Image (cartoon, helix red, strand yellow):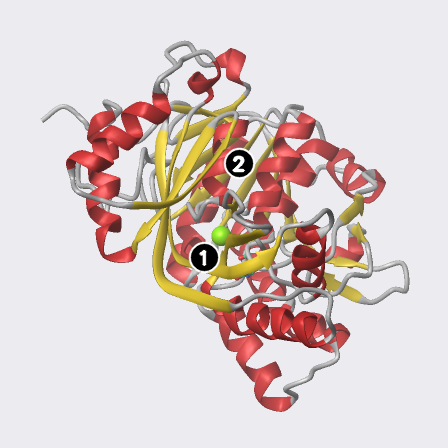
Amino acid sequence: MPLLVMKFGGTSVGDLARIRNAAEKVRREVERGFDVIVVVSAMSGKTNELVGWVEQTSPLFDAREYDAVVSSGENVTAGLMALTLQEMDVPARSWQGWQVPLKTTSAHSAARIEDIPRANIDQKFAEGMRVAVVAGFQGISPEGRITTLGRGGSDTTAVAFAAAFDAVRCDIYTDVDGVYTTDPRIEGKARKLDRIAFEEMLELASLGAKVLQTRSVELAMRYKVKLRVLSSFDETDENSGTLVCDEEDIVEQNVVSGVAYSRDEAKMTLISVADRPGIAAAIFGPLARAGVNVDMIVQNISEEGRTDMTFSCPVNQVPRAEDAMEKARASGEINFHGLVADTDVAKVSVVGIGMRSHAGVAARMFESLAAEGVNIKVIATSEIKISVLIDRKYMELAVQALHDAFGLDKAA
Ligand code: ASP
Ligand code: MG
């Protein structure tokens, strides 16, 4: 029988009525002839509560016990979903990660999936089970300990099951009805996209569009899993939501598909560092070892052998970055005249695979920001993305201006 993976996020299983609503959607797919693997998150708010309990109990917690605790939210929803389906006369049972087994690395709290042997679940399907309800976000390490996949990890569980079981599609049910051209809370004229390419979704996810865990999109791209994002609160059919797919499957391609933003950025400048071979390594090596996620980098032209080096990183990593730089200075690895942190910045990006074949996207972006009087502090580009760092107070204005400039506004 063809197999479908259906993933329900925390708000979609937030109470018993919502679990029943989700189970209804599963039952409909079973009636259409699908075997289904359902992947569930914990009830909304549950994982945060569990993380809080761990941190209160043990600030420098043992990551193995952290995983033992925070994985438990999904066990509850998996069991309740299986019971709800059974009450609807749908043959279903629940599976915790270790029972499948979903094998992962031993990187606790950020484990990677290594393998999902099919035999156990396949056997139950062969015996007449129609729905396997799997607890998302969790697995088992080679040492036999419970692991978790990082926050938002149930998306990745779902895609991994879709790949392992050759699912026709992986449907991600959530509290929004799809992927939008930008955040509708910032731009009321944002439109839902019918389709978006994997690469674009990957950029948007890593740029702060929170619908899907970035790693789930990487995995879907690698294994060509058709992913669909749709709302568990709407009536849905085959055409609902947004399909994340191969770019060949997109007929009408805009040059720019979306505008993303992130408020949590900081810009740091090392003033007057000696410009010599190895200087970038001497700066960014210590930052990497301190766990600072450097994003954009700009080195100024040097004057009399000295230059300024600017980089951006998440705003909550500024103290760590400052500490790493001061230590590198103290040990003589680098020297600089000053370190300036600007924590009132935001990053705004335009994303689209159409950029590969269209010139002038950067120019249009900069012109439209200039027309609004927005000053650009740092620019970074990739093949399908242009990002700028600007003053945070202009972020909404910039998102709206770019949304309009690239023809993304929905018809009035
Ligand atoms: N419950 C986990 C979290 O809140 C995993 C997930 O829902 O995807 O991060
Ligand atoms: Mg999520």
Q: Is residue 26 above or below residue 351?
A: below
Residue identified by numbered label 2: 202
- In screen coordinates, is 44 left or right of 293? left
Q: SS of the residue at dot 2?
A: helix
- In screen coordinates, is 111 left or right of 412? right
Query: Is there any visible trace of residue 256 in the rendered image?
Result: no
Which image quarter holds the N terminus?
top right
Residue identified by numbered label 1: 13
Q: Position of residue 237 (x, y in %)?
A: 38, 27
**Pick the front one: 250 or 32:** 250
Mark 1 is surrounded, within 10 Å at the Cα level, by few (under 14), some (14 to 19) or many (20 or more) other residues, namely many
Q: CA distance from mark 2 to mark 1?
A: 26 Å
Q: Residue at x 77, y 34 (%)?
A: 126
Mark 2 is surrounded, within 10 Å at the Cα level, by few (under 14), some (14 to 19) or many (20 or more) other residues, namely many
**Pick the front one: 299 or 85:** 299
Farthest-out residue, right = 143
Farthest-out residue, left = 412
**Pick the front one: 381 or 77:** 381
Which amino acid type corresponds to the residue marked 2 in the rendered image?
A: Leu
Query: Is there any visible trace of residue 284 in the rendered image?
Result: yes
Q: Comparing marks 2 and 1, which lies closer to the viewer?
A: 2
Q: Is residue 147 above or below residue 301?
A: below
Q: Position of residue 183 (x, y in %)?
A: 29, 44
Which amino acid type corresponds to the residue marked 1 in the rendered image?
A: Val
Q: Position of residue 137 (x, y in %)?
A: 64, 56
Which image quarter holds the C terminus?
top left
Q: Residue at x 41, y 57 (%)?
A: 11
Q: Quadrant of residue 259?
A: top left
Q: Quadrant of residue 291?
A: bottom right
Q: Is residue 246 above or below residue 93?
A: above
Q: Position of residue 225 (x, y in %)?
A: 62, 28
Q: Residue at x 39, y 63 (%)?
A: 342
